[in-house]
Image (cartoon, rainbow, N blue to C red):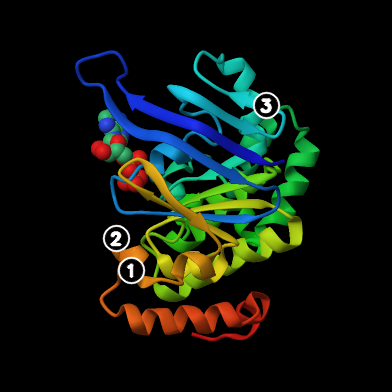
């Protein structure tokens, strides 16, 4: 399922004195089964774009194509429901959305709401809890008795339980320690590879973008100013500097990026210890 943004503009409070354009004529194509990173400073429009991938926001102008379906101004909520099932969003601090009595019920909630049988939903939960790296015994616990990192994994299992074709990650490692960050990012990468999940990562981290993504788009003041492979994007430090994206030690960083790009990612994921 390819995703295509065509000339997408978005204004908050459109038509009021508070009208504020956050996206301007954004064009972006994300082919099926690829890993796309979207990077940019705070306020560049990343969260606004992210909410267009499953119709939480509809473009003020332009169109978002999700496979055969189109999201545009005026679309009814009912027409967007099938898109919500296909595109899962892991918001920042997804553990804040946990609410059920047990982990099992929490993971089953989404699919059962979308008409999946209880038996099938439970089977998915049992499979997914292992996939996110937690023991099956956790299923009978209250999510609120778990650690922050464990809660996040449960919340991620809840998104995966919808069996999405596309997963959108909004700074998925915010607030985790470096080891937890790496484990979660590697987990998403394995999922992307093994299940062919189209993955869209919205992040501040140029390092994660370079390490995991096939393609990177840079957002700047509501415009998609640059898009290409990590090698193309990081080839020229000057280009990044133009968008104030340089890191303090750009040369050292570029050497590191180069080393990462020259290694097979699967190898990094399986062997590198940090
Ligand atoms: P990012 O995710 O890159 O930090 P956002 O998409 O949140 O950027 O914001 C893009 C622009 O839209 C910013 O100028 C921000 O102030 C503005 N904005 C975001 N949310 C709202 C809102 N609910 N109402 C008005 N303006 C908003």
Residue 101 in view, yes or no = no
Marks 2 and 3, how far apart in space? Answer: 36 Å
Image quadrant in which the N terminus is located = top right
Name the residue that disc number 3 marks: 69
The image shows residue 229 at horizontal and vertical percentages of 56, 63
Whether the residue under disc 1 has CB within 8 Å of ligand 1: no
Name the residue that disc number 2 marks: 242
- Camera-nearest label, 3 or 1: 1
Q: Residue at x 68, y 60 (%)?
A: 191
Q: Is residue 6 above or below residue 260?
A: above
Q: Residue at x 60, y 38 (%)?
A: 4
Residue 13 in view, yes or no = yes
The image shows residue 203 at horizontal and vertical percentages of 42, 57
Q: Earlier along the polypeptide chain: callout 2 or callout 3?
A: 3
The image shows residue 83 at horizontal and vertical percentages of 64, 30
Apparent side of residue 219 relative to residue 18 in the rendered image (left or right): right
Q: Residues within 10 Å of mark 3 (few under 14, many from 20)?
A: some
**Could you tell me which secondary element the residue under label 2 belongs to?**
helix
Marks 3 and 1, how far apart in space? Answer: 39 Å
Q: Residue at x 58, y 69 (%)?
A: 186
| Camera-side residue of 35 and 255 | 255
């Amino acid at each position: 399922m390819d995703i295509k943004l065509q000339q997408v503009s978005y204004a908050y409070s459109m038509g009021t004195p508070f009208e504020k354009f956050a996206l301007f004529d954004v064009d972006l194509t994300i082919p099926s089964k690829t890993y796309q990173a979207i990077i940019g400073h705070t306020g560049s429009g990343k969260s606004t774009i992210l909410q267009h991938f499953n119709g939480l926001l509809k473009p003020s102008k332009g169109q978002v194509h999700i496979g055969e379906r189109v999201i545009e101004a005026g679309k009814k909520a009912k027409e967007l429901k099938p898109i919500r099932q296909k595109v899962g969003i892991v918001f920042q601090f997804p553990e804040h959305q946990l609410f059920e009595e047990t982990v099992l019920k929490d993971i089953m909630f989404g699919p059962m709401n979308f008409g999946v049988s209880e038996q099938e939903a439970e089977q998915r939960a049992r499979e997914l809890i292992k996939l996110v790296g937690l023991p099956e015994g956790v299923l009978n616990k209250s999510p609120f008795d778990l650690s922050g990192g464990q809660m996040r994994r449960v919340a991620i299992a809840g998104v995966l339980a919808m069996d999405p074709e596309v997963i959108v990650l909004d700074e998925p490692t915010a607030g985790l320690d470096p080891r937890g960050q790496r484990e979660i990012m590697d987990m998403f990468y394995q999922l992307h590879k093994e299940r062919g999940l189209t993955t869209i990562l919205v992040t501040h981290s140029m390092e994660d973008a370079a390490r995991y993504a096939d393609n990177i788009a840079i957002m700047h003041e509501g415009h998609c100013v640059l898009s290409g492979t990590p090698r193309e994007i990081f080839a020229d430090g000057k280009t990044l500097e133009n968008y104030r994206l340089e890191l303090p030690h750009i040369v050292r960083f570029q050497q590191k990026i180069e080393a990462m790009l020259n290694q097979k990612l699967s190898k990094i994921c399986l062997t590198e210890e940090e």
